[in-house]
């Protein structure tokens, strides 16, 4: 949406009654919520690092993983 389109929409909203503005706000918020990607939680990473055997240097582990990608 261009700045001029945004300004036009805002002008139209300002012409609505307070009740209609509130209803529009609810409908827009609902639409945005339905069309937004879900937020992720840091808790989704739980257990990700468990594949790294204890005692291997972190950089060495990364190097081994990268080497395994090349097949």
Image (tube, rainbow, N blue to C red):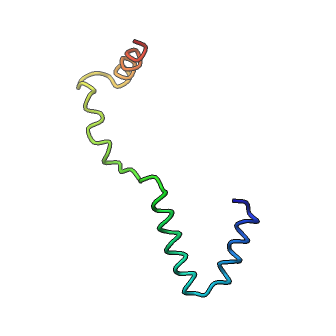
Above or below residue 31? Residue 16 is below
Horizontal side of residue 9 vs 67, given as left or right:
right
Total labels drawn: 0
Quarter of the image holding residue 12? bottom right
Q: Residue at x 28, y 42 (%)?
A: 46
List the single residue furthest toward the left.
54
Task: Check the image and report above or below for 45 versus 30.
Answer: above
Residue 57, compared with residue 21, is above or below; it is above
Q: Nearer the viewer, residue 64 or 56?
A: 64
Q: In percent of the image, x 28 and y 26: which residue is there?
A: 52
Q: Position of residue 2 (x, y in %)?
A: 73, 60
Quarter of the image containing the N terminus?
bottom right
- What residue is shown at x 68% (from left), y 74% (from top)? 10
Query: Is 59 situated above or below 22?
Result: above
Q: Nearer the viewer, residue 46 or 18?
A: 18
Looking at the image, which residue is at 68% across and 84% down? 15
Q: Quadrant of residue 45?
A: top left
Residue 17 in the image, given as x and y percentages of width and height: 61, 87
Q: Position of residue 33 (x, y in %)?
A: 46, 62
């Amino acid at each position: 949406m261009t700045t001029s389109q945004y300004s036009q929409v805002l002008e139209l909203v300002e012409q609505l009654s307070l009740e209609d503005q509130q209803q529009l706000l609810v409908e827009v918020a609902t639409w945005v919520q339905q069309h937004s990607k879900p937020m992720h939680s840091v808790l989704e990473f739980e257990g990700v690092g468990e594949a790294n055997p204890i005692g291997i240097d972190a950089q060495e582990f990364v190097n081994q993983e990268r080497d395994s990608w090349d097949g």
